């Protein structure tokens, strides 16, 4: 894999030591960390009892040489608009934050690493869906 963008559930699995996610990340040349995913993780951390510990793990991950924090840019919003429009027309909506992730993947040409099969409805999105137990 060249460039990947892990979904929130993939990041959570990574932090829990999921070997499938670890293997996918080890094969990547570049790992994009979406600000959308970082925000979802922050929200989850705040709802738990280990906020500081979880934030420290995230921060250690984000400073790795192979990790690039990916902002939402003007190009991202163009991809977002096109994807959301097509999904609405097909009658196959997905959560709005997942549309943003799909848009970032399309913009960067990266592969989305996820446990969510609902991304299958996004035409042209390159996916690596983690195996389900």
Image (cartoon, rainbow, N blue to C red):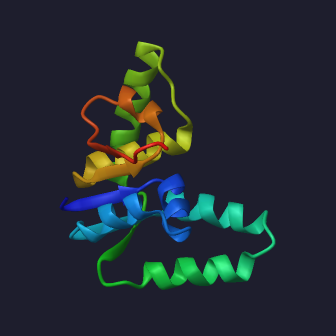
Quarter where residue 23 is shown: bottom left
Residue drawn 53% across the image and 82% down it: 59
Q: Is residue 124 left or right of residue 36?
A: left
Q: Is residue 109 something that shows in the picture? A: yes
Residue drawn 43% across the image and 48% down it: 114
Residue drawn 70% across the image and 61% down it: 44
Decide: is 98 above or below 17.
above
The number of callouts visible is: 0
Looking at the image, the residue that sits furthest to the front is 133
Is 4 or 21 nearer to us in this picture? 21
Residue drawn 37% across the image and 84% down it: 64
Decide: is 23 above or below 124.
below
Residue 131: percent from left, percent from top: 40, 45
Q: Is residue 77 something that shows in the picture? A: no
Residue 118: percent from left, percent from top: 46, 31
Is 17 or 1 nearer to us in this picture? 17
Q: Which quarter shows the N terminus?
A: bottom left
Quarter where residue 81 is shown: top left
Residue 9: percent from left, percent from top: 53, 53
Decide: is 101 above or below 43.
above
């Amino acid at each position: 894999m060249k460039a990947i963008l892990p979904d929130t559930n993939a990041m959570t699995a990574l932090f829990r030591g999921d070997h499938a996610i670890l293997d996918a990340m080890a094969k990547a040349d570049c790992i994009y960390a979406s600000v959308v995913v970082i925000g979802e993780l922050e929200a989850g951390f705040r709802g738990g009892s280990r906020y500081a510990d979880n934030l420290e793990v995230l921060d250690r991950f984000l400073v790795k040489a192979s990790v690039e924090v990916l902002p939402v840019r003007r190009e991202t919003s163009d991809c977002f608009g096109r994807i959301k429009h097509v999904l609405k027309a097909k009658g196959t909506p997905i959560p709005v934050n997942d549309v943003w992730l799909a848009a970032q993947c399309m913009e960067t040409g990266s592969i989305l690493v996820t446990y969510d099969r609902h991304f299958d409805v996004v035409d042209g999105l390159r996916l690596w869906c983690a195996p389900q137990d």
